[in-house]
Image (cartoon, helix red, strand yellow):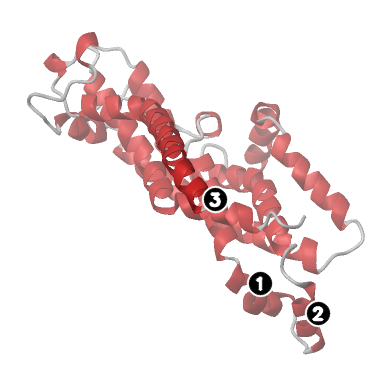
Amino acid sequence: MDNVIRRRTPGARLGRAAVYAVLLLAALFYLLPLVVMLITSFKPLHEISPGTLLSLPQSPTVEPWIKAWGEACTGMRCEGVGGYFWNSIAIVVPAVLISTVVGALNGYALTKWRFRGSELLFALMLFGCFIPFQVVLLPMAQTLGWLGLSSSRAGLILVHVIFGIAFTTLFFRNFYVAVPTELVSAAKLDGAGFFRIFWRILLPVSAPIIVVSVIWQFTQIWNDFLFGVAFSAHDTQPVTVALNNLVNTSTGTREYNVDMAAAMIAALPTLIVYVLAGKYFVRGLTAGSVKG
């Protein structure tokens, strides 16, 4: 048996090396556009040509980044994307927090405090995950007008919270199904109420699915363009809208290095989130996959 294992070991190692090589090539191919963007953003304009996309900058400069942040023209104004970047932060942070909290409470109520019609309610909320965004543009615009939130950050936050609740509820509901109901029943017998049970029993074990919800919502909201362009004014536009305006502004020479720097600025938050917490996203998703 030992001889058989020894004879098979070199082949197994070769197969594993081949798999790793294929995965590495796939990763390099996938990352190639990002590498081109990053290299181009540090090049002076005279070094950029179709034949030098992958060449390193001869005279590296951060001037394109400075111009993209505070000077580039995004339509009629030349103020860069810095202000729009902070608009996105002001929209994303409260929208992610609110949708995550509401989704957690919904998932908790739908699994541990079931009531008549709870399954139907969950099915209707789940249906919200599949509604195309374009379908609700006009009804949502009218609703924001009635509420006095048109073209405001608060209106965009409300829109993202409403559309995010369906997903966060799904995440937390599937996760809490795997939590033993006996713990909640015992707490009820001891006199604990709805929020006390949630705070003391459910929330301490919810870290994996909270990470999933935060990453999912952060990515969806930060990368959103449709709602940003439809429900915002110039002073409240997110960075994705400003990036589109910058790239499509044609005055003078096309500054590809500035365009790439602006694109990197817009992409950095999601890149950082996935690099730092990407593995927890997968763990959190699989944690709630046993039941439900």
Say if mark 2 contacts mark 3, CB within 8 Å: no
Q: In what element is the residue under mark 2?
A: helix
Counting residues from the start of the chain, the first of labels 1 and 3 encountered is: 1
Q: For mark 3, does the 10 Å Cα neighbourhood hold few (<14), some (14 to 19), or many (20 or more) residues?
A: some
Counting residues from the start of the chain, the first of labels 2 and 3 encountered is: 2
Q: Amino acid at mark 3?
A: Val
Callout in the foreground (2, 3): 3
Q: For mark 2, does the 10 Å Cα neighbourhood hold few (<14), some (14 to 19), or many (20 or more) residues?
A: some
Q: Position of residue 108 (x, y in %)?
A: 72, 65
Residue drawn at x 18%, y 29% as measured from the top left: 42
229 to the left or right of 135 = left
Residue drawn at x 11%, y 31% as measured from the top left: 61
Q: Position of residue 54 (x, y in %)?
A: 23, 20
Residue on which disc 1 sits: 202
The image's mark for residue 185 is: 2
Q: Position of residue 76 (x, y in %)?
A: 32, 21
Position of residue 162 relative to residue 52, above or below, is below
Q: Amino acid at mark 2?
A: Ser
The image's mark for residue 216 is: none
Position of residue 59 relative to residue 175, above or below, is above
Foreground residue among 185 and 3: 3
Residue on which disc 3 sits: 282
